[in-house]
Image (cartoon, grey):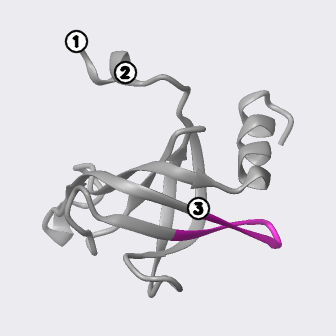
Amino acid sequence: MNMSDKRDSKRIPFRVMLDYGPKDPPAHRSFATDLSDTGVCIKTNKVFKPGVELYMNIEIGEKTYPAYGVIMWAKVVPPRLVRVIKNGMGVRFTYMDPGLLEEYNKKKEGIA
């Protein structure tokens, strides 16, 4: 079984800035590489352990959407390899702002 068989929803490339962290308001800044209606991948070397609840504020255009989730995987790589090896965290949403879900659906349908 490959990883795509485990996913219930379609991941789409979604490169947007976000603030994230285990406390609200989140203290760290990075960017998302992809998004689905169930989670997000954050590209960063400032990772937290799987199982930690993460608060996120995801910026799309002029709007910021709150989301919360649980870290499913986390990987740090040496700085010289960040362009070659996937690093960061995969987060499964426990809450996703309805506006963020709408943005995802528009992009998935090719509207945005």
Q: How far from the left and from the top, in percent, is residue 102?
A: 79, 44
Point out the image quarter for the C terminus: top right
Q: How far from the left and from the top, in percent, is residue 66?
A: 64, 67
Residue beneath label 3, please?
67
Point out the image quarter for the N terminus: top left
- Magenta stretch: dominant secondary structure: strand
Q: Quadrant of residue 74?
A: bottom left
Q: Nearer the viewer, mark 3 or mark 2?
A: 3
Residue beneath label 2, please?
4
Residue beneath label 1, please?
1
Question: CA–CA distance between discs 3 and 2?
Answer: 23 Å
Q: Is residue 15 magenta?
A: no
Q: Nearer the viewer, mark 3 or mark 1?
A: 3
For image coordinates 20% across by 64% down, the residue present is 49
Q: Start and end of the magenta stretch?
A: 56-66
Q: Is residue 64 magenta?
A: yes
Q: Quadrant of residue 87?
A: bottom left
Q: Secondary structure at mark 3?
A: strand
